[in-house]
């Protein structure tokens, strides 16, 4: 089964060694002072394990996230959009590389991470298990999935683990171009023909529920938020990030004349919190555990890529290989 069993089970603390209380207190004091923790520094086993889990899942999300938009490169309307989308997809794969490097600093090799991805042991973002049927789906991803990712990453870039924060800073800079590209494409559809407007509205209807899931389960059922917030790996809760996304993007979507497919969606002005239909967490669990519309297809593509790239990786490992001298 994909995703390693019960979705919301907390990483088992009992299997981890008892931490030295003095080292733990020093570590927590550093976090409280806002210092960055670096790879060679002492850290609790649980901190290391949680970071590997989260950064690895993030890296996989970037790599798998390249697939739904990737299928639109050749079909994007116009040469300039093809070029821009190709650059964006290439950036996403680059983000995966940065994040795998950050996770490697914690002791899990890239090979192990890729194995866990293609064997279905690791999770990756729920949204990429849905199909991009039309060009408008691809535009939704470029604008709003990237927007959600920026909300999450800008917050967590201020977190405690140096290599992850530095990777997030660089990723956010590139994502801001993706978001502009996506917004531009959506504005074009919004100000186009009835067919174009309808195409984006249908994409919005399809992608809204997965987008609400994107920020993770509601705080009251989130397994890891408490410990991750305590150690400043996560700098905002899932519900707070969802709320921030709604604050920033609902007005922009409505401004373009589209309708959000949730009759309960409204901002409670006294609290500043958005009210919405509770996302279907059972569907979320199914999708992140391997039973979404595209999970099998996404992993199959990665497996093929892994097989095809094997000879290159093997050749690179042979440091002292002698090659045929080119004739010219
Ligand atoms: N999808 O205790 P919780 C991109 C899992 S790519 C799948 O709240 P946590 C882009 C969670 O892992 C950027 N699984 O977890 C790329 C846990 O399961 P395990 C994607 C999810 O870690 C290409 C369980 O549910 N962004 O933007 O405290 C093209 C319980 O959840 C999801 C990131 O990866 C989900 N959405 O908080 C375009 C951000 N949500 O591990 C765009 C990095 C939860 O116990 N990750 N789960 O089996 C994070 O910030 C946090 O891990 C989350 C979840 C906020 C997502």
Image: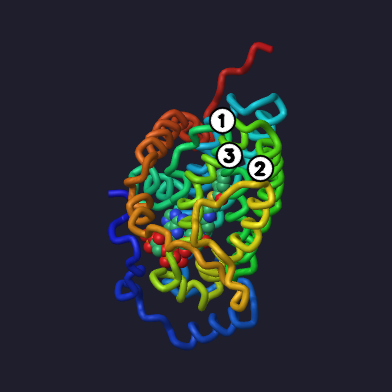
* Lateral position of residue 156 relative to residue 314, left or right: right
The first of marks 1 and 3 along the sequence is 1
Measuring from the top left, give residue 182's x and y in whole percent: 66, 42
Q: Are marks 2 and 3 in contact (CB under 8 Å)?
A: no
Which residue carries the number 1 mark?
Answer: 72
**In the image, what residue occupies the spot 64% across and 56% down?**
249
| Observer-nearest of 270 and 72 | 270
Res 200 label: 3
| Observer-nearest of 307 and 179 | 179
Measuring from the top left, give residue 290's x and y in whole percent: 33, 47
The first of marks 2 and 1 along the sequence is 1
Q: Is residue 37 visible?
A: no
Q: Secondary structure at mark 3?
A: helix
CA distance separating discs 1 and 3: 15 Å
**In the image, what residue occupies the spot 71% across and 41% down?**
184
The first of marks 2 and 3 along the sequence is 2
Measuring from the top left, give residue 84's x and y in whole percent: 69, 34
78 w.r.t. 45: above or below: above
Q: Secondary structure at mark 2?
A: helix
Which residue carries the number 2 mark?
Answer: 182
Res 140 label: none
35 w.r.t. 176: above or below: below
Q: Secondary structure at mark 1?
A: loop
Q: Is residue 270 visible?
A: yes
Q: Mark 1, mark 3: which one is toward the viewer? A: 3
* Lateral position of residue 311 relative to residue 192, left or right: left
Measuring from the top left, give residue 117's x and y in whole percent: 40, 46
* Lateral position of residue 292 relative to residue 263, left or right: left
Label 3 environment density (alpha carbons within 10 Å; few <14, some 14–19, many ≥20): many
CA distance separating discs 2 and 3: 12 Å
């Amino acid at each position: 089964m994909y995703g390693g069993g019960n979705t919301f089970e907390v990483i088992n603390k009992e299997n981890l060694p008892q931490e030295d209380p003095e080292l733990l207190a020093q570590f927590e004091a550093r976090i409280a002072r806002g210092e960055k923790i670096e790879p060679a520094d002492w850290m609790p086993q649980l901190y290391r394990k949680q970071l590997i889990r989260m950064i690895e899942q993030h890296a996989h999300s970037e790599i798998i996230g390249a697939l739904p938009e990737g299928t639109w490169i050749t079909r994007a309307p116009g040469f300039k959009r093809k070029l821009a989308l190709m650059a964006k997809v290439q950036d996403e794969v680059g983000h995966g590389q940065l994040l795998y490097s950050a996770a490697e600093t914690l002791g899990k090799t890239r090979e192990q991470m890729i194995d866990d991805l293609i064997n279905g042991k690791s999770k990756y973002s729920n949204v990429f298990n849905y199909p991009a049927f039309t060009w408008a789906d691809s535009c939704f991803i470029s604008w709003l999935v990237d927007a959600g990712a920026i909300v999450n990453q800008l917050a967590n870039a201020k977190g405690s683990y140096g290599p992850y924060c530095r990777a997030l800073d660089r990723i956010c800079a590139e994502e801001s171009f993706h978001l502009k590209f996506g917004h531009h494409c959506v504005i074009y559809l919004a100000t186009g023909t009835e067919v174009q407007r309808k195409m984006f509205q249908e994409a919005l209807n399809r992608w809204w529920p997965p987008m609400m899931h994107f920020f993770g389960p509601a705080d009251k059922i989130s397994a890891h938020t408490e410990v991750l917030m305590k150690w400043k790996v996560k700098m905002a809760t899932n519900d707070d990030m969802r709320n921030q996304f709604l604050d920033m993007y609902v007005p922009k979507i409505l401004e373009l004349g589209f309708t959000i497919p949730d009759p309960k969606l409204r901002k409670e002005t006294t609290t500043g919190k958005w009210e919405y239909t509770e996302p279907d967490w059972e569907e979320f669990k199914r999708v992140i555990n391997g039973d979404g519309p595209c999970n099998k297809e996404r992993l199959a593509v990665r497996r093929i890529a892994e097989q095809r790239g094997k000879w290159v990786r093997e050749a690179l490992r042979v440091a002292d290989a002698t090659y045929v001298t080119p004739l010219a």
